[in-house]
Image (cartoon, rainbow, N blue to C red):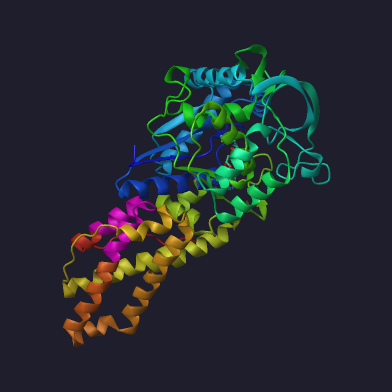
Amino acid sequence: MDNKFYITTPIYYVNGSPHLGHAYTTVVADVLARAHKLRGKEVFLSVGTDEHGLKIQQKAQEAGKGPQEFADEIAGQFKELWDKLGIEYNSFVRTTSPRHVKAVQDALQILFDQGAIYKGTYKGLYCVGCEQFLHEKDLVEGKCPDHGLEPEVVEEESYLLKMTDKQAELIKKIESRKFHILPERYEKEILSFLRSQKLEDVSISRKNVAWGIPLPFDEKHTTYVWVDAFLNYLTTLGWGASTGSGQVLEMWPADVQLIGKDILRVHATIWPILLMYLGMELPKKLVVHGHILSGGKKMSKTLGNVILVDELLEKFGVDGTRYLLLSAGTFGEDVDMTMERLVEKYNADLANGLGNLVSRVVKLNESLKVEIGGSEAGQSGLDKLTVNYSPDSFLAEIWQKVGQANKKIEEERLWELTKENKTKAKDVLKEILWFLSQTAALLTPVMPETAKKISEILRTNKAEILFPRVK
Ligand code: MSP
């Protein structure tokens, strides 16, 4: 299908409630999905939760609950938050759903039958936070730098996935950008990693983790998170052995897979190699973002420095929150958030910027009565979103013009001009009205409700406070 756009978010662990980092990825995905819809594409946005593994098993135990009950509760919280944030997803995958479990077993059997998976032993340093084996050189003062935890030394029988056989092919796909990693610095990072060393085979099963999917060819083992988790991107489309490993699902390959930089390495190695063994095309783009930091550190449930999304929603509303998330920093880089800075930005850009412009224009037009027609988002206006993946510069460009429009009203002394030279005043206002109607159209993917309200206000010329100032 030519006219399709399949976009995925990572599936989030259910070891704790959703936080701002998760909301960031998901809002960006929703904005990209909506922008492609505006461009007439048939869009499929997939989200979900990653529910197996040691970490979740442990958290459930601490909470005095069974793992499924615990997972149900947290998955519910994610769904609720996505509804509050206005995420228009098409599918919510849960890795404990019978359909997913069955499809993962199908995939494992296919891999096993062709010798891509073999039985061995694995000795390594296991970080429960990452649900991954780490190397000595990854550690900082003996601890995982992402989770601040000392990994556990594990030596056990394990099934491993052969990696090196596919390494050369993988490098070629990345170089040719058939599998395009962006922003560019992440592509460089992965290429230099892949060129400098032979990939080690990856452990894909654990023997003593009950909360997982049993291997169909050895029930004593369960897959550990990554193989189970990656396959969600396929199972959500209905993939399974009955659809045939090589069969091209209508929406596959994914057009964009959005991920945080912490899970880039696995998404750029294990995942494409799994797909190659399954005879499936690789995703077209892996779009990588930085982390939202709080107090200079990655926000994470394990670290306990989480900012509550509900607080933002209460203060800034849905569209205000969406705007602030997208504009708080350069896409791809880390963004350090503080409540003070968010309040400042909200007041400057939304209350005093766009909100003020709209209400001034309405007042002026009470006497000038300029008529404007509706407006569609210009095709090229959305390029920064749909082609360049830089939501922050997309918004910065619009807000620069909002600033200019506010300035123009002052420079032209439009209040007085209305009385002195009505024709000229009308021309100036007409230009600003046209800009606002364009802006409303362009903002639709980012701030759907605000966009609607602005169009309505321009049509009826009835004022409404879009963004009340906050303290
Ligand atoms: N379950 C795995 C992903 C499997 S995908 C096949 C996982 N889950 S996670 O809940 O720990 O994090 C998933 C994603 O959440 C990260 O890659 C990132 O996209 C997002 N974030 C988590 N914390 C974040 C921040 N503090 N800031 C921005 N995004 C971060 O990894």
Residue shown at 60% from the left, 25% from the top: 52
In-image side of 184 versus 456 (left or right): right
**245 in the magenta segment:** no
Total marks in image? 0
Tell me, yes or no, if residue 298 can be seen here.
no
Residue situated in front as seen by the camera: 101 or 428: 101
Residue 470 visible (yes or no): yes
**Looking at the image, which is closer to me, 381 or 340?**
381
Along the line of sight, which residue is nearer the eye, 316 or 181? Answer: 181
Which quadrant of the rendered structure holds the N terminus?
top left
Q: Magenta stretch: dominant SS? A: helix
Q: Where residue 71 sits in the image (x, y, percent)?
A: 56, 26
**Residue 300 % position (x, y):** 64, 43
Which span of residues is magenta-colored?
Answer: 436-456
The image position of residue 385, as x and y in percent, is 42, 55
Horizontal arrangement in the rendering, residue 117 relative to residue 283 (left or right): right
**Residue 421 occupies which quadrant of the picture?**
bottom left
The image position of residue 292, as x and y in percent, is 59, 51
Q: Is residue 122 above or below residue 347?
A: above
Q: Quadrant of residue 151?
A: top right
At a point 57% along the width and 48% down the height, the residue shown is 175
Residue pictured at 29% horizontal, 62% vertical: 438
Q: Is residue 144 left or right of residue 263?
A: right
Does residue 87 sit above or below 458 in this rendering?
Answer: above
